[in-house]
Image (cartoon, rainbow, N blue to C red):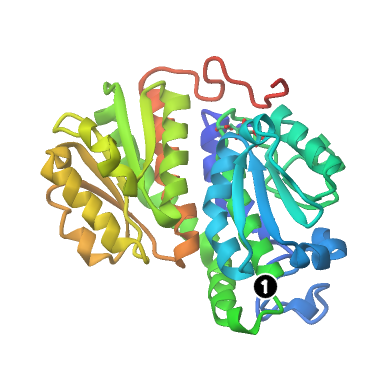
């Protein structure tokens, strides 16, 4: 039911403080969980029951391969860096279709993680069958309980995000990122060297739902206004890097599927390798600027775009309190999301893009919950 919301998509965007809480329930345990809590042994840590039988095999693997399509692929892009950092294993990400086309070599020592909201996506499911044939350990990260991918994988973690009805994935995306990060925390539980970083991420997870609530409250009206200004454009470029590479890719996908405006998500490090030729004072640009290890490089990208007149039509999605980016606030449209730990910043920064794509579709009079030519579950290859 949509309740008081005009569209399922808007309802699902607004459900995220709750869906993220559900994703973490019983898995990210606070420091002061009650003594009779079943999770009392994991106070201040994480616990993933669905992985416990195979966690040893997972830890002993030689590499981790994420396999997914569309938005689910972007969540893998968002989760990869922390997975690499905390497990110190090589982590690759694969579009399920390309993974199958290449007949990617797989070994028994590999772990393949299949990420899917529906659990029924044909390419992802076929890739899972292939991985099983190669005897790799298969792990599902799926929202729909009882779906094919949930049933066929050796072990897994449900998103618990609740039913997602709108064709464009929103709350499943943010829950997928959380699950991948929680898996990374679980895999690195025994690493002494990682405890400080693990605690930082764990504690930030617990405060994330409130920051999502604040982001929705602060930015919905702003994004509606920006959608009104952007709605007649035919093309928008989105740039990001580091933890925001995923944000620019997913933001571009959301805008194109909902508004039918041509968009491209581009790694900001690639600007000079071609995309700069597209930049002039008429090209709308959205730049994601985190306050993290990539800040200096993102500012370089900002200067490159500015030098080609691209600042005339620029929206920056930045972080509250980032004085370097605030210097540009009189020249560009600047929206800021609250500050959290670097690897979770992408969960907050995608929210203005979800809202923007929603308002663009409404402003252009399009079918928000069922964009043309798309289906919620892609069951044919
Ligand atoms: C975009 C979207 C799609 C799906 C993709 C995979 O908003 O929803 O790109 O993410 O079709 O679907 P699942 O996650 O069900 O495997």
Judge by depth and name the residue closer to the eye, 87 or 5.
87
Residue at x 88% of width, y 63% of height: 53
Which quadrant is home to the C terminus? top right
Residue at x 55% of width, y 67% of height: 85
What residue occupies the far front of the structure in this picture? 105
Residue at x 79% of width, y 52% of height: 156
- x%, y% of residue 100? 69, 32
**Residue 190 occupies which quadrant of the picture?**
bottom right
Q: Is residue 126 above or below residue 223?
A: above
Which quadrant is home to the N terminus? top right
Q: Is mark 1 within 8 Å of ligand 1?
A: no
Q: Is residue 130 above or below residue 190?
A: above
Judge by depth and name the residue closer to the eye, 139 or 288.
139
How packed mark 1 is, by other alpha carbons closer than 10 Å (few <14, some 14-19, many 20 or more), is many
What residue occupies the far top of the structure in this picture? 373
Judge by depth and name the residue closer to the eye, 104 or 50.
104
Residue at x 36% of width, y 51% of height: 218
What residue occupies the far bottom of the structure in this picture? 192
- x%, y% of residue 340? 44, 66
Quadrant containing ligand 1 reads: top right
**Residue 90 occupies which quadrant of the picture?**
bottom right
Q: Is residue 18 visible?
A: no
Q: Is residue 183 above or below residue 38?
A: above
Task: Name the side, left or right, on which 314 lies relative to 198.
Answer: left
Number of numbered discs: 1
Q: Which residue is mark 1?
A: 188
Mark 1 residue element: loop
**Residue 105 occupies which quadrant of the picture?**
top right
Task: Name the side, left or right, on which 204 lies relative to 266.
Answer: right
- x%, y% of residue 327? 15, 60
Q: Is residue 367 visible?
A: yes
Q: Is residue 163 above or below residue 166?
A: below
């Amino acid at each position: 039911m949509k309740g008081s919301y005009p569209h399922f998509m808007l309802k699902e965007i607004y459900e995220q403080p709750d869906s993220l809480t559900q994703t973490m329930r019983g898995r990210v345990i606070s420091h002061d969980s009650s003594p009779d809590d079943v999770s009392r042994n994991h106070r201040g840590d994480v616990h993933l029951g669905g992985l416990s039988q195979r966690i040893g095999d997972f830890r002993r693997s030689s590499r981790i391969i994420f396999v997914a399509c569309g938005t689910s692929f972007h969540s893998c892009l968002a989760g990869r860096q922390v997975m690499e950092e905390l497990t110190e294993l090589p982590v690759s990400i694969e579009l399920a279709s390309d993974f199958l086309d290449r007949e990617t070599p797989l070994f028994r020592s590999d772990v393949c993680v299949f990420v899917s909201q529906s659990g029924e996506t044909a390419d992802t499911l076929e890739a899972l069958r292939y991985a099983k044939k190669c005897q790799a350990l298969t792990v599902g990260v799926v929202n729909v309980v009882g779906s094919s991918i949930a049933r066929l994988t050796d072990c897994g973690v449900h998103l618990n995000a609740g039913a997602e009805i709108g064709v464009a994935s929103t709350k499943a995306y943010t829950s997928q990122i959380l699950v991948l990060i929680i898996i990374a925390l679980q895999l690195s539980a025994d690493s002494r060297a990682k405890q400080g970083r693990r605690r930082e991420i764990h504690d930030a997870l617990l405060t994330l739902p409130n920051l999502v609530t604040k982001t929705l409250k602060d930015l919905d009206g702003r994004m509606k206004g920006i959608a009104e200004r952007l709605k007649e454009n035919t093309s928008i470029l989105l740039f990001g890097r580091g933890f925001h590479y995923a944000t620019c890719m997913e933001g571009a996908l959301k805008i194109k599927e909902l508004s039918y405006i041509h968009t491209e998500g581009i790694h900001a490090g690639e600007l000079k390798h071609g995309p700069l030729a597209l930049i002039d004072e008429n090209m709308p640009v959205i730049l994601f600027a985190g306050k993290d290890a990539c800040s200096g490089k993102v500012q370089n990208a900002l200067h490159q775009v500015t030098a080609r007149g691209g600042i005339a039509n620029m929206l920056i999605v930045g972080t509250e309190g980032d004085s370097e980016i605030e210097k540009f606030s009189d020249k560009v449209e600047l929206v800021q999301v609250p500050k959290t730990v670097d690897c979770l910043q992408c969960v907050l920064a995608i929210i203005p893009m979800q809202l923007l794509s929603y308002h663009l579709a409404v402003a252009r009079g399009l079918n928000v919950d069922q964009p043309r030519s798309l289906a919620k579950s892609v069951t044919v290859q």
